[in-house]
Amino acid sequence: MRLTDFGMDTITLAGPLKVKLRAMREAGFTQVMLAARDVVGHPDGEAAAVARIRASGLRVTGFQVLRDFEGLSDHLHDYKVDVAKSMLRLGHLLGAPLLLVCSSTSTRATGDLDVLVADLRKLATLAVPLGMRVAYEALSWGRSVHQLAQAWAIVARASHANLGLCVDSYHALANEGAVDAVDVIDPAKVFLVQLSDFLWPRIENREERIETARHLRVFPGEGVHNDLVAELVRRLDRMGYAGDYSFEVFNDDYGQMPPAAVCQRAMRSVHWIAHRVGRRSLPVLREVRAP
């Protein structure tokens, strides 16, 4: 089977980078979303990490994650711009087509829409010479932007070819965001979709939202929001999204399991999505059903 539309995030697996890459490849995945800590934490340095990734044969989905970037002023803004430049340079060396940036949680950041738009437009412009794009994600505990619709309003207003959205199923579900919010988004501005679920019907407060996001996510098909996750993918497919799907599953239990076993769970999730969504236009569904 060719499953080139689905990949995994290195965050999801335990162990050194080479073990993670090998486990993904052996499970049948062909792409990888890279977390910065797996690159800069390589014992032989960033250049060795880049070489290892290139040798793996896995296509790089993107590079993450730039946090608390937009809405700052004066020296704080300058500091974050410098951090962003460093991440963009490293992402370029990795061959990453995009940098993921999460909506700010900083109490020092303004919620002024004009400032948020200007900052993200600047970031997208910085990425142009490096051949990268910027995918903006609404964290479900973001200070000013915590819903997909809010992130889309900013991206649409910025109107920059290099700036788009990351749609994350966890944040949409955890914040009880409406799945039908994707219906108003320009599909050309969806740069990445990240998939995961969790194990209880609803999350009561910000602290539980953060705790679940960082420690207790599960793969689609393992949680309790099966219908909503499937509907999200179905709507994205219907609107014409033809980009990448990446499993970003922070889970402390998975961190204590062999990477190969976790990758097999992820592959089962790919098959679950294919059959649950039930649309022949999904490439993976055609491949799964092929004789």
Image (tube, helix red, strand yellow):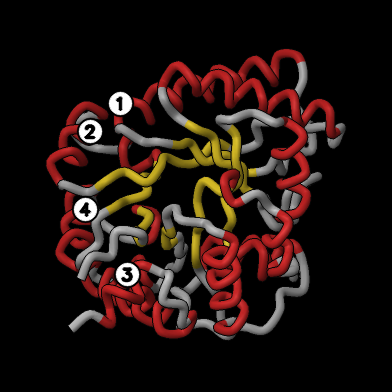
Q: Nearer the viewer, mark 3 or mark 1?
A: 1
Mark seen at residue 50: 2
Give percent across and percent down for residue 264: 26, 75
Q: Mark 1 touching mark 4, by CB under 8 A?
A: no
Q: Quadrant of the N terminus?
A: bottom left
Q: Nearer the viewer, mark 4 or mark 3?
A: 4
Secondary element under disc 1, as helix, strand or loop, is: helix
Residue denoted by label 4: 21
Give the CA separation, mark 1 to mark 4.
17 Å
Mark 2: amino acid: Val
Query: Nearer the N terminus, badge 4 or badge 3?
Result: 4
The vertical placement of 75 against 157, above or below, is: above
Residue denoted by label 3: 256
Mark seen at residue 93: 1
Secondary element under disc 2, as helix, strand or loop, is: helix
Q: Nearer the viewer, residue 84 or 233?
A: 233
Q: Is residue 234 left or right of residue 175?
A: left
Residue density around tag 4, few if under 14, some if 14–19, many if 20 or more, within 10 Å: many
Give the CA separation, mark 3 to mark 2.
26 Å
Residue located 61% across and 18% down the image: 79
Mark 1: amino acid: Leu
Query: Nearer the N terminus, badge 1 or badge 4?
Result: 4
Give percent across and percent down for residue 222: 46, 83
Quadrant assignment, res 70: top right
Secondary element under disc 3, as helix, strand or loop, is: helix
Secondary element under disc 4, as helix, strand or loop, is: helix
The vertical placement of 146 against 88, above or below, is: below
Q: Nearer the viewer, residue 190 or 86?
A: 190
